[in-house]
Image (cartoon, helix red, strand yellow):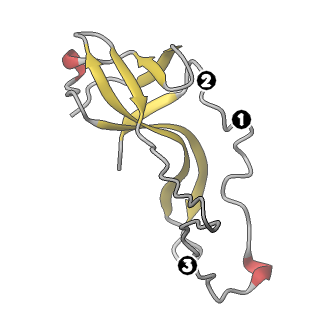
Amino acid sequence: MINKELRVIKIVNEYEIIINGGSEAHLINGEMLEVYAVGAEIIDTQTNESLGTLDYVKATVYVKTLYPKMALCKSAVDETRKFSDVLLFAEYTVTEKLNIDTADIESAFSSIQDKKVRVGDLVRKAL
């Protein structure tokens, strides 16, 4: 269990960041983490109960190098691309749309202005 609030403290390059937690914060090498922004609070319209916040995940990273008080983390997203020289061939996934009433659409992420990873962003174990 992480015993402190983790944040991005340095951006090394386009692939790596340093966070302010390491082995003393109970992180381990290879562990998946999320850089995120706290989103809008979601309220159950039937009970008025707060269900928590719908956070925006800016990036998924893994602990590459662990130190006692910090960790070097690297992007965990690899994109696979396929291409053929003879005929143009690409592999992709299509997501089927939900059958919804479009009048009920409201952006849960509209309050999040900055979707770039920045020094000071929050970090947590990947859910």
Amino acid type of the residue tagged 3 in the rendering: Gln
Which of the marked residues, 2 or 3, is nearer the chain's N terminus? 3
The x and y percentages for residue 11 are 54, 16
Q: CA distance from mark 3 to mark 1?
A: 32 Å
Residue 24, image x, y percentages: 20, 16
- Which mark is on residue 46? 3
The residue singled out by tag 2 in the image is: 118
Left or right of residue 107, residue 14 in this image: left
Q: Residues within 10 Å of mark 2 (few under 14, many from 20)?
A: some
Q: Look at the picture and state if 86 lies above or below 127.
A: below
Percent from the top left, x then y, of residue 9? 49, 14
**Residue 33, horizontal then vertical, whole percent:** 37, 37
> Mark 2 is on which residue type?
Arg
- Above or below, comparing residue 5 to residue 55 in the picture: above
Circle 1 Cα neighbour tier, 10 Å, few/some/many (<14 / 14–19 / ≥20): few
Up-down relation of residue 31 to residue 110 (above or below): above
Q: Earlier in the sequence, mark 3 or mark 1?
A: 3
Q: Three-letter amino acid code at disc 1?
A: Asp
Q: CA distance from mark 2 to mark 1?
A: 9 Å
Query: For residue 70, what is the image quadrant?
Result: top left
Q: Crowdedness of circle 3 by 10 Å Cα count: few (<14), some, many (20+)?
A: few
Instruction: Please report contact status of discs 2 and 1: CB closer than 8 Å, yes or no.
Output: yes
CB under 8 Å between discs 3 and 1: no
Residue labelled with disc 1: 114
SS of the residue under disc 1: loop
Q: Which image quadrant: the N terminus?
A: top left
Query: Which SS class for mark 3?
Result: loop
Q: Residue at x 55, y 68 (%)?
A: 92
Where is 4 relative to 127, above or below? above
